[in-house]
Image (cartoon, helix red, strand yellow):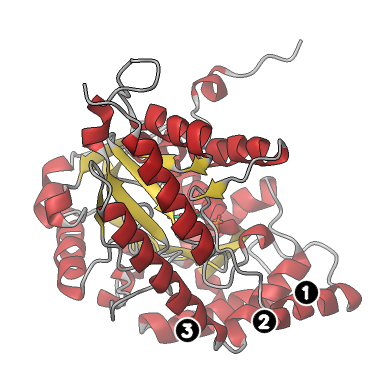
Amino acid sequence: MIRVSKKIREMESSPTLEISALAAELKAAGHSVVAFAAGQPDFGTPGHICDAAFQAVRDGFTGYTATAGLPELRSAVAEVYSERLGLALTPSNVVVTVGAKNALGVFFQASLDPGDEVVVPAPYWVSYPTMVRSASARPVIVECPADAGYLLSADALAGSVTPRTRAVIVNSPSNPTGSVYSRDEMSALVDRALELGIAVLSDEIYEDLLFDGAGHVSPLSLHPDRLDDFAVVTGVSKTYAMTGWRIGWLIGSPELVKAMAKIVGQTTSGPATFAQKAAVAALKGDRGFLDGWIEQYRARRDVMIEGISRIEGMSPHVPRGAFYLWVDASPLLERLLPDGSPVGSSKALARYFLEEEHVATVPGSAFGAEGHLRLSFATAMQDVEEGVARLARAVERLAAP
Ligand SMILES: Cc1ncc(COP(=O)(O)O)c(C=O)c1O
């Protein structure tokens, strides 16, 4: 009989996908579910990008690509990001992967040895610690408090570094908090990382989704002459509403890119060729649609913040990027569920909201921050209004201890 390995038995499943699956079950059973758990835009991929994929299939782009990616896509990434990051990149600095998630996983496999450590600021994106562990390395979780905007300070980084530390992960705009590092904050952090001799892995998948005049600062853009010390991961998933196309990439030194391409060549052989062609169209095409999308995200964010702020026991953090509202719901953990038992955990609270009012949220424990919830506003305004009203009703029914 095939036995599941110890490593995988001990691996946590992706909690965001788990909640979405439960919500899908309720939906299939005929309930009207408000999905605040999704980690993807509710918009469709723009037509010109879809057309490029159809055309690519017709033109015969249906075979394997080179393992590091379609030369045309690597060139397009090098061209666009040379401009954005302020350095001269070539295709040799780019490896294309099956979404940004795969770029992160392959990066860890390529750059970590057993026992190495990676600093992971919390709240963190759910997959970072698991991915680091999968590379037989150790995630060192550093809590970033609300009063510091959930950002990692240079001093907190220095306090968590050991001789085994290889890298620190920076994710701005952040999933789950929506926090965005200013130029000064990023500079202070990155300068310290370089002084300490550790690499910076920057996950910039939400780089284009910014509000209130916030600007995106890539750590690499602050030290364009130190490419060996940086890895930038991003892709088309969030900006262009292309989560299902599975195209991401990493920008780094040619040595790192070659090491990662070796892994890609022995595992996935890279993403679908016509999807890579579509990504070229995304990068090179008109981005006029984006302003309208961002305006819609912002409007929903504001309505969600207003509604959630009125619920006793819930305090939202104002996100300046991405499409998530990070809510401190810790006072609610002491309240009592209908069966008289205390709520106790963010997971139990999320389950209560889903079962009682059919609102899907993601518990903070998934992001290393108990007592919180993550609510996605990548959903129609009508759903935002309805979902917030349902949450308010559900909270009213939680009895005081
Ligand atoms: C912070 C962060 N990094 C990476 C990813 C993965 O992106 P992709 O869908 O391109 O694999 C996500 C997706 O939710 C994310 O939120």
State the residue in front, 91 or 302.
302
Question: On the image, which quarter does residue 217 sit in?
Answer: bottom left
Distance from label 2 to label 1 (Cα)?
9 Å
Q: Residue at x 53, y 37 (%)?
A: 19
Q: Is residue 201 visible?
A: no
Q: Which mark is residue 291?
A: 3
Neighbour tally class for label 2: few under 14, some 14-19, many 20 plus, Cα within 10 Å:
some
Q: Residue at x 50, y 43 (%)?
A: 359
* Horizontal relation, residue 323 to residue 240: left or right: left
Quadrant of the frame with the N terminus:
top right
Q: Dot 1 corresponds to which residue?
A: 53
For marks 3 and 2 on the same chain, the one whose residue lies earlier in the sequence:
2
* Horizontal relation, residue 128 to residue 73: left or right: left
Neighbour tally class for label 3: few under 14, some 14-19, many 20 plus, Cα within 10 Å:
few
State the residue in front, 216 or 232.
216
Quadrant of the frame with the C terminus:
top left
In the image, residue 219 lies at what x, y percent? 29, 69
State the residue in front, 275 or 105.
275
Q: Residue at x 73, y 15 (%)?
A: 2
In the image, residue 289 lies at what x, y percent? 56, 84
Name the residue type under label 3: Asp
Q: Are marks 3 and 2 in contact (CB under 8 Å)?
A: no
* Horizontal relation, residue 42 to residue 331: left or right: right
Q: Are marks 3 and 1 in contact (CB under 8 Å)?
A: no
Q: Dot 2 corresponds to which residue?
A: 281
Tell me the element at label 2.
Answer: helix
Q: Are marks 2 and 1 in contact (CB under 8 Å)?
A: yes
For marks 3 and 1 on the same chain, the one whose residue lies earlier in the sequence:
1
Please state which of the two labelled residues, at mark 3 or mark 1, is closer to the viewer: 3
For marks 2 and 1 on the same chain, the one whose residue lies earlier in the sequence:
1
Name the residue type under label 1: Ala
Please state which of the two labelled residues, at mark 3 or mark 2, is closer to the viewer: 3
